[in-house]
Image (cartoon, rainbow, N blue to C red):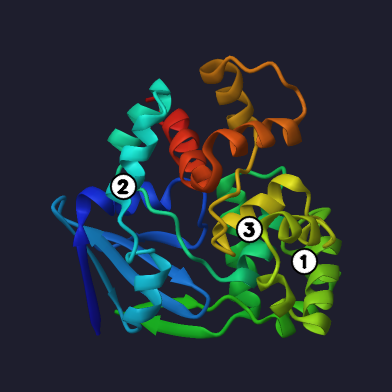
Amino acid sequence: MDIITYNAQYFNPLHTLDCGQIFRFEPFKEGFLVVSGSEACYLHTDGVTTYAECENGDYFYNFFDLARDYSKIVEKAKSYNVPLLFRSAEACSGLRLLNQQKEEMIYSFIISQNNNIPRIKGIISRICNALGEKREFLGAEYRTFPSTAAMAEAGAEFFKSIGCGYRDKFLDETAKRIYAEGIDNLEKLNTSELKKTLMGYKGVGPKVADCIALFGFSRRDSFPVDTWIEKIYREDFGGRLLNRNKICDYFLELFGENSGYMQQYLFYGKRLNL
């Protein structure tokens, strides 16, 4: 068993898991059981130190982005002199952006469109229970996220039967395409090209593409725009644009390569009513 320790000021389990970037976690012992792909981790904190207990330390060290100094990112957030961003970066300095599995993020965020988090988590859980492999970690049973081969073979009727709604065809067609083509070619693209290519998959629009790029491909120069961000844009930035693509461009110009971090601080801070 590997045990990773980290300064809790810059690694808060709740803030990291609760900000909408990950769906596969649940309360466990004194913290959370986090599952990514086929790997599981027990994540908990005493308020001073955060502990990640797992069988694959290298995987979760990268997954939680622990090689990056977030104290600099927090200070950068404060430097923009945006009150909401300042308050959020200060109160949620332990929020970290995750480096998640690419294919899992493609399917997960297709499911996320026009959906709420409890329902998204439920659908993903049912997919994993039906198509994933059974594993055990620290006495807890969990299921791996299914392979693209399993997703492609399942069929649209399966996805419909577990409550995916109109997304059934999106998942089916996208899984079949990825199974046939792979996604290695996506790695080589710059962020703009990546987003454009992702939108060629069924069920992937601009916001979903930004989420996949940010949380699956670690493109921190991405800024997903949803109803929360539109609200922030109007109320905290005095913006008047109505087109989400233009709102996205506004924030990308403002925050540049730090866009993804700032998006998460703003999004989570607004949800917490900071």
Q: Which residue is mark 2?
A: 72
Q: Nearer the viewer, mark 1 or mark 2?
A: 2
Mark 3 is surrounded, within 10 Å at the Cα level, by few (under 14), some (14 to 19) or many (20 or more) other residues, namely: many
Q: Residue at x 51, y 84 (%)?
A: 134
Q: Which quadrant is the N terminus positioned in?
A: bottom left
Relative to 218, is 62 on the left or the right? left
Q: Which residue is mark 1?
A: 159
Quadrant of res 124: bottom right
Secondary structure state at the residue bearing disc 1: helix
Badge 2 amino acid: Lys
Give SS at disc 3: helix
Which of the numbered marks, if any, corresponds to residue 71?
Answer: none
Viewer-side label of 3, 1: 3
Residue 213, labelled with which disc? 3
How far apart marks 3 and 1 lie (CA) works out to: 24 Å
| Number of residues whose C-alpha sits closer than 10 Å to that of mark 2, classed few (under 14), some (14–19) or many (20 or more) | few
Q: Indicate the amino acid at tag 1.
A: Phe
**Counting residues from the N terminus, which is met first, the one under dot 1 or under dot 2?**
2
In the rendering, at what x and y percent does residue 215 appear?
55, 58
Asked whether disc 1 touches disc 2, contact meaning CB atoms under 8 Å apart, the reply is: no
Q: Residue at x 48, y 42 (%)?
A: 264
What residue type is disc 3 on?
A: Ala
Viewer can see residue 9: yes
* Of the image marks 3 and 1, the number of the one nearer the N terminus: 1
Q: Classify 10 Å Cα crowding around label 1: few (below 14), some (14-19), many (20 and above).
A: many
Where in the figure is residue 39, as x and y percent of width and height?
A: 44, 79
Rounded to the nearest angstrom, the CA distance separating label 1 from label 2 is: 43 Å
* Mark 2 touches mark 3? (CB < 8 Å): no
Q: Position of residue 49 (x, y in %)?
A: 16, 58
